[in-house]
Amino acid sequence: MRIGIVCSGGDAPGMNAAIKKFVEISYQLGYEPYFIYDGYEGMIDGHIKKANYSDISGIIHRGGTIIRSSRSKRFFEYKYRKQAYENLKKEKIEHIIVLGGDGSFRGLDVLSKEFDLSFIGIPSTIDNDIPFSDYSIGVDTALNVIRDCIDNIRDTASSFKRAFVIETMGRECGYLAAVSAIANGAEICMIPEINFDWEKVKKRLIKEFENGRNYLIAVVAEGCKSTWKMAKWIEENFNIETRISVLGHIQRGGKPTVRERLIAGEFVCVALNNLDEKNKVVVKQGDKYSFVDIQTLVSSSYKLDKKIIEMLNFLD
Ligand code: F6P
């Protein structure tokens, strides 16, 4: 049986570790592994090739994805999905593993309903916003990259007695910002999931400045769209020079962490050993992997772990 692997949407560190495992396990199980390059754009244009061991040597430590990715607008149109299916059919690919987020899973679900094809989704996004899964490939590395950035910013913030507002990625999800704020000991954290109580935070920080605080780190999730507002508010209320640092795509790159590589491999093992779980997504809850039906998944939204929210409460 021929199985394809495709990356769709934002790339994430650990995708290469998953791709390597995909090829190795496919051969072990007697399948023929195929790469679909350039995401759904490449599926439409027929960028498909049989994978071999030389393709996967020297890739496990690299961020990004060697088979590249895309956000395909054409895939929304039936005529291009048909073209994509015809390319897959020509290569006799019956099953696809997709590394991406829920939008990407939704796209393949449409394709699998229109044509004779099945897929398994593996959560892969630094945003970590896939419902039912407490882990998505890429998030551990992104958190470690953010940790290093904030540690560096802290050096200059403390030397200058300045406040820094640091914007993290994550779309509408505050996971990256929340965990980074906790792990980096930020004084302020603003995420879309929690209503920010300006007055309460102001009262706490006034006391802290009276009691010796001389610099400030605020982490704001991009989904709040309040980075500049936060900087202005800090300057106006605490009389401290403030700088903004939007971390941007730096968060998406870098060498995947050990945890990332291990979990990426586990996701792929679970997917390839359960190909009869058609049109489902592998999710990880604690140490357990299971499958969630695509409809259930796309009709739900990601909820930030209560424990994380509790840990943030001390920042009120
Ligand atoms: O979904 C991953 C992500 O990095 C988001 O955190 C961010 O909002 C978005 O992708 C950026 O997308 P692009 O790389 O297309 O600018």
Image: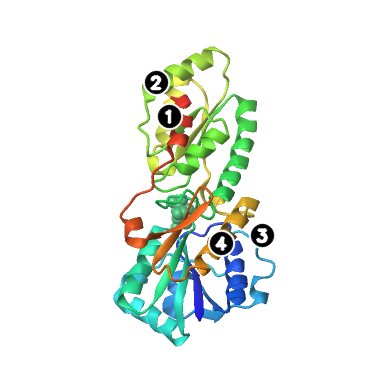
Q: Residue 312: x and y, percent?
A: 46, 30
Residues at circles 4 and 1 in contact by the CB criterion of under 8 Å: no
* Residue 278 in sight from this viewpoint: yes
Amino acid at the residue labelled 3: His
- Seen at 53% across and 60% down, the residue is 267
In this view of the protein, which residue sits in the foreground, 79 or 260?
260
Q: Quadrant of ligand 1?
A: bottom left
Mark 1 = which residue?
A: 232
Judge the density around disc 4: few (<14), some (14-19), many (≥20) Cα neighbours within 10 Å: many
Q: Specify which label sits upstream in the sequence, 4 or 2.
A: 4
Residues at circles 4 and 2 in contact by the CB criterion of under 8 Å: no
Cα distance between the residues tagged 4 and 1:
39 Å
Q: Specify which label sits upstream in the sequence, 4 or 3.
A: 4
Mark 4 = which residue?
A: 15
Q: Specify which label sits upstream in the sequence, 4 or 1.
A: 4
Q: Residue 116: x and y, percent?
A: 36, 79
Q: Residue 117: x and y, percent?
A: 39, 77
Q: Outermost residue, top direction?
A: 210
- Seen at 42% across and 53% down, the residue is 130
Q: Secondary structure at mark 1?
A: helix
Cα distance between the residues tagged 2 and 1:
17 Å
Cα distance between the residues tagged 2 and 3:
44 Å
Mark 2 = which residue?
A: 200
Amino acid at the residue labelled 4: Met
Q: Is residue 261 above or below residue 48?
A: above
Q: Specify which label sits upstream in the sequence, 2 or 3.
A: 3
Q: Outermost residue, bottom direction?
A: 90
Q: Nearer the viewer, mark 2 or mark 3?
A: 3
Q: Where residue 61 is drawn, which disc sits there?
A: 3
